[in-house]
Amino acid sequence: MELLDLLERLMAFNTGLLPDMVELKFEAMAENAFRFFRGTCHLFYEDLAAASPLPLSPLAWICGDLHIENFGSYRGDNKLVYFDLNDFDEALLAPAAYELARMVTSIFIAFDQLKIGPKKARRMAELYLRSYSVTLAQGKAKSIEPRTARGIVCDFLKAAGKSTYKDLLQKRTTADRSKRVLSLEDERHFKIDKKLREELLTHMQQQVVGTNGGPYNYKVKSVVFRLAGTGSIGVKRYLFLLKSTVVKQHYLLLDMKQCRAASPLPYIPVQQLQWETEAERVTGIQRRMQNVSAALLGTTTFQGDSYLIQELQPVKDTIKFKLLKHDYRGMYQVIDDMGMLTASAQLRSSGFQGSSNTDDLIAFGRSEGWQDALLGYALDYAGRVKRYYDQYVKDYKDGKYAAIQ
């Protein structure tokens, strides 16, 4: 029965997004089961609500779509590079265990995709929950930057810190008659029609000039439609190139992404804050969960839609787990860090506009029994995702996902 309405559920969720981009999203989701999982956050929470299998847990601010590739590096507004949770499109207030269930499910799916045995996957999932529980029980949020990082994450942050804007500009832009513009040769960049392009350029220039703390001494020079991620493919997303009016040949790249309602929202039995816009929800929760906010994080409204604005940074990246397939010790350290960071984000935002206080989170971390129940659900659900994926690939090859509007 679980497979009968898969097509209907996926088509319904993606209706209203940009049809040509949704085609690319469906293509990406057919790549493997983990990519499918990343693109179907709404299915996870809908199924979770229907089953209601998880033990009781304190309310916490969650990123909503936590998986092993939603941790990564970024430069904070204090100029330091951090490793932390880095995607908050689906963020909201929910039982803490919901975040853990999605993350642990992602471990089982990703490790199966990498053909890492089920025993090792189970040990990694147990490690993640143990690290999370220990950090909660201590009641003190921690952070990771180059001076405190260990192992693979330390190497990753050091390498990220050496990335430069020159490298990023080489990949993303081209020089045309001494004029630098965003490149349309990049497969992630798409041309925008003239009228919309001019409206976007004007809007961003007004945003740059009128925002406190923004890059006011820059001139907006170029814009393209940008394709990125998996779950967010289909929303309106633009990349801007800005040139400094003060420093010669100095540029800045800004990403402007449309924010929709959090996909878990219909399935979370918790009263939510009334945010002014969806972009305010995303940035508001991101600021309270991350140790240090990302540089140039902001919001805007364009043609009736709310957007998240953030710098496209040369240091922003995620750890590629397929490169760690044969480095068990390195993978162990990364998973351990991810458990600590998840707990730290919840501790950091505890007692804040509806979330449980630190004492409740400490008690949850010290309690026993819920970990086994959560592991059991995540393992079972990973099996369901594989069945979903097999059915999806069959239907996709049969052309059933071609009629999105």
Image: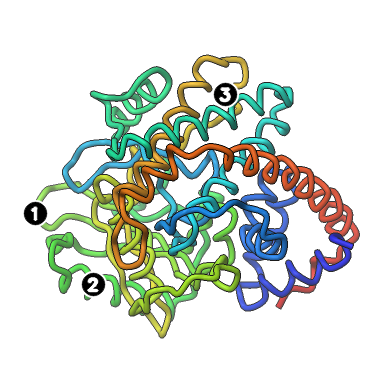
**What colour scheme has been applied to the protein in the rendered image?**
rainbow
Q: Nearer the viewer, mark 1 or mark 3?
A: 3
SS state under label 1: loop
Real-space CA distance between mark 2 and mark 3, rounded to the nearest whole angstrom = 40 Å
Work out whether mark 2 precedes mark 1 in sequence or the reverse, and give the earlier one: 2
Residue on which disc 3 sits: 323
Location of residue 188 in the rendering, given as x and y in whole percent from the top left corner: 53, 52
Density class for disc 3 (Cα within 10 Å; few <14, some 14-19, many ≥20) is few
Would you say 393 lies left or right of 197 here? right
Location of residue 122 in the rendering, given as x and y in whole percent from the top left corner: 66, 28
- What's the residue at 67%, 30% (across, down)? 111
Q: Residue furthest left?
A: 246
Confirm whether residue 57 shows in the render: yes
Q: If the image is split into quadrants, where does the C terminus sit?
A: bottom right
Quadrant in which residue 243 is drawn: bottom left
Residue on which disc 2 sits: 207
Location of residue 308 in the rendering, given as x and y in whole percent from the top left corner: 36, 65
Real-space CA distance between mark 2 and mark 1, rounded to the nearest whole angstrom = 18 Å
Real-space CA distance between mark 1 and mark 3, rounded to the nearest whole angstrom = 41 Å
Q: If the image is split into quadrants, where does the N terminus sit?
A: bottom right
Residue on which disc 1 sits: 246
266, 305: nearer the viewer: 266
- What's the residue at 11%, 49% (across, down)? 247
